Amino acid sequence: MRWLVKVALSCVFPKTEHLPGIADADLDAFLDIYARQAHPMMRFGVYMAAIAFIFVLPIVTIYVPLPVFLMPAAWRDAHARRAATHRLYLVRQVMLLLKLAGGYCWGADPEVRRRLGLRELRPDPGTFRESF
């Protein structure tokens, strides 16, 4: 499952000439923390969103019955763009879940923040679950 989430998030947050992709961030460390701290329903939703994004939605968005990891980069980009702007809300909801989870990792990356002109975040004290 973890590999599928990494593939999906890498398609949603690709590397560009101006910004690093999520694969350049410490995605493995983030996924370890996410697996420990996220609510089980949220983890389940992200896993199902990754499966849908990789295997099901390419048929709906770019009319190709291939999983995204077998597609050329241009097709993956078109698939992600069309899924994010699709007329059916359920398709856009898949993208929302992936962007929500991946945005926590990508947006906290020091290099991404530097390139966007944002200050670096302080280290996470790791007390999120302890506060409940």
Image (cartoon, rainbow, N blue to C red):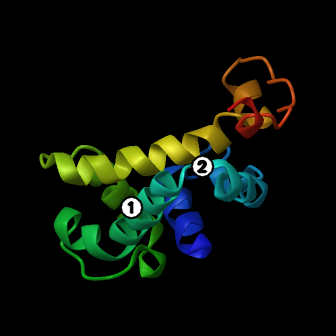
Residue 85 against residue 64 in the figure, above or below: above
* Label 2 vs 1, first from the N-terminus: 2
**Which residue is at the far front?**
132
Say which residue appears at 78% left-offset and 56% top-offset. 29
* Of 82 and 43, the residue lying toward us: 43
Residue 14 against residue 120 in the figure, above or below: below
Say which residue appears at 74% left-offset and 59% top-offset. 32
* Residue 12 in view, yes or no: yes
Give residue 36's quadrant in the image. bottom right
Question: What residue is disc 1 on?
Answer: 49
**Which residue is at the far left?**
87
Query: Which element type, helix, strand or loop, lies under badge 2?
Result: loop
Say which residue appears at 74% left-offset and 61% top-offset. 28
Q: Label 2, label 1: how many angstroms apart (C-alpha)?
A: 15 Å
Residue type beneath disc 1: Ala
**Disc sitting over residue 74 in the figure:** none
Query: Which element type, helix, strand or loop, lies under badge 1?
Result: helix
Q: Position of residue 22 (x, y in %)?
A: 64, 51
Report the side of 84 relative to 126 (left or right): left
Image quadrant in which the C terminus is located: top right
Q: Position of residue 92 (x, y in %)?
A: 26, 47
Bin the neighbour count of mark 2 within 10 Å (Cα to Cα): few under 14, some 14-19, many 20 and up. Answer: some
Question: What residue is disc 2 on?
Answer: 38
Residue 49 against residue 14 in the figure, above or below: below
Residue type beneath disc 2: Ala
Report the side of 120 relative to 97 (left or right): right
Give residue 107's quadrant in the image. top right
Q: Position of residue 57 (x, y in %)?
A: 26, 67
